[in-house]
Image (cartoon, rainbow, N blue to C red):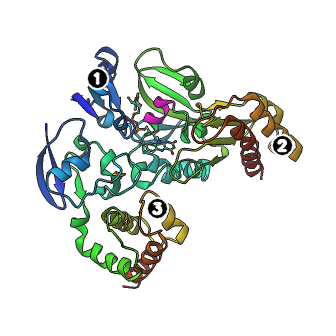
Amino acid sequence: MNITLRINGKQESIECLPGEMLTEVLRRAGHFEVKKGCDTGNCGACTVLVDGKPVLSCSYLAVRAEGKEITTIQGLADEAKKFAAFLTAEGADQCGFCAPGFALTVLAMKEEFSSIPDEAQIRHYLAGNLCRCSGYEGQIRAIKKYLEAQHAE
Amino acid sequence: MEILKYACPQSKDEAFRLIREEHGTAIGGAAWLRTNTKTIALGVDLAGLGLEYVREVGDHIEIGAMTTYRELETNPLLRARFGALFETTVSHVVGVQLRNIITVGGTAAGRYGFSDLNTTLCALGAQVVFYPDQTMDLAQFIERGAKVPFLLEKVLLPATAKGTYHQMRISENDFPIINTTAVWTGSEWRIAVGSRPAATRLCPKAMALLGADLHPSDDILASAARAAADELQFGSDIRASAEYRREILPVLVRRALMEVRE
Ligand SMILES: Cc1cc2nc3c(=O)[nH]c(=O)nc-3n(C[C@H](O)[C@H](O)[C@H](O)COP(=O)(O)OP(=O)(O)OC[C@H]3O[C@@H](n4cnc5c(N)ncnc54)[C@H](O)[C@@H]3O)c2cc1C
Ligand code: FES
Ligand code: FES
């Protein structure tokens, strides 16, 4: 079957099988920035935004994305770069495999909260993003500093 | 997950027909289904049925089967009527991104032993409505299952109740090794226990000990908590032994009861 999605603002028509998940379909269309980690719904590496909401693309039925707005990290590249600078400054980015999903979840959190979330709220919101390298402390520092800087702008 | 034929009906009649007469498999959030390697001959996507809602109807609250966990966690009506109960119940289930996908219907229909949510729903006295016209206590459905393929349309809750949820996990994103919800309905206590590791059960003996008093003594709370552990069966699995679950449960039940009593 054929589905039409808006990926990062651009309409794309893609072939997919009825049981396929969104990760496969996006990667087949060349969106390799969408990472395939555990492929079981546990790690958050495959996160994309569907109509602005963060979802695990490995657990999201591709046919359901028909007509929806899909945002990968490429679609928020400018914002992601700003955040990445904070990650680097805190030494929180190592192999970088988790980074696209992680950054998208942070950006979704920023949109969802009207004020700056506190550390407990940040940890709770990011609980679904696993990182095998960094140990999380640097990431939490980076998120806090990034959100504060954004708020001050 | 392989789906040989896919349908996305726009009416509940058609969805029900496909499930009942053509042996279609209902697709809720699909997050659990996709972990299964079984080939699905006919997938019936429930996304076109308008089953995403939380609303008040008469003297109860209705939650549509396709409502996501994230909606339960953030919904203002549920927050106003049950405080943080739904948030604390679902907030350990992996992350926000999965909770934006998984559904109430898929959870109730699945009758999973490990479920956080089914424990709270049972403690609240939830009923499940099967399309077109059958209503059943969720606790009863979890115990007995269904004899024929069904379309679970919605879950009914009382308009308000006071409850708290407690669980224990080895690690944050894992399934619970034991969980419990205690509820004061306004006239009686209800206690449900899940992840035994078998599915959620009510604790009628413990509930009876608490009586119809919102402020039972510490001694009564402790005996009710112990009674809950005594009246239930526990099993062992890779997460915990039956003995461990039996020892931990009274602590969680007592904490839950004390919080509600306050
Ligand atoms: C990675 C992962 C981790 C999880 N961790 C936890 C956890 O820690 N705690 C916890 O409580 N839960 C956990 N769950 C389970 C989750 O909470 C849901 O209960 C589960 O995913 C089912 O919901 P779904 O919407 O994905 O259902 P689906 O996968 O769509 O369906 C599940 C079953 O229900 C049937 N079904 C779905 N909707 C209906 C309907 N309306 N009528 C009739 N039948 C229906 C389907 O045919 C299928 O048999 C986890 C799930 C995943 C994928
Ligand atoms: S790849 Fe989707 S959660 Fe790990
Ligand atoms: S930096 Fe390697 S997994 Fe996160």
- Relative image position of residue B196 (x, y in whole percent): 63, 35
Q: Amino acid at mark 3?
A: Tyr
Answer few, some or many: residues within 10 Å of disc 2's Cα (few below 14, many 20 plus, some between 14 and 19). some
- Callout 1 secondary element: helix
Chain containing mark 3: A
The chain that hosts pointer 1 is B
Residue located farthest toward the bottom when viewing the structure as drawn? A152
Amino acid found under the numbered disc labelled 2: Ala
Badge number at residue A90? none
Residue B222 has which mark?
2
Looking at the image, which residue is at 70% across and 41% down?
B244
Q: Identify which residue is drawn at 80% across, 43% down.
A: B214
Rendering quadrant holding ligand 3:
bottom left
Say if disc 1 is inside 8 Å of ligand 1.
no
Write down the residue under mark 3: A125
Q: Amino acid at mark 1?
A: Glu
Q: Residues within 10 Å of mark 1 (few under 14, many from 20)?
A: some
Instruction: Return the residue at label 1.
Output: B14
Do callouts 1 and 2 point to residues on the same chain? yes
Tell me the element at label 3: helix
Magenta stretch? B105-111
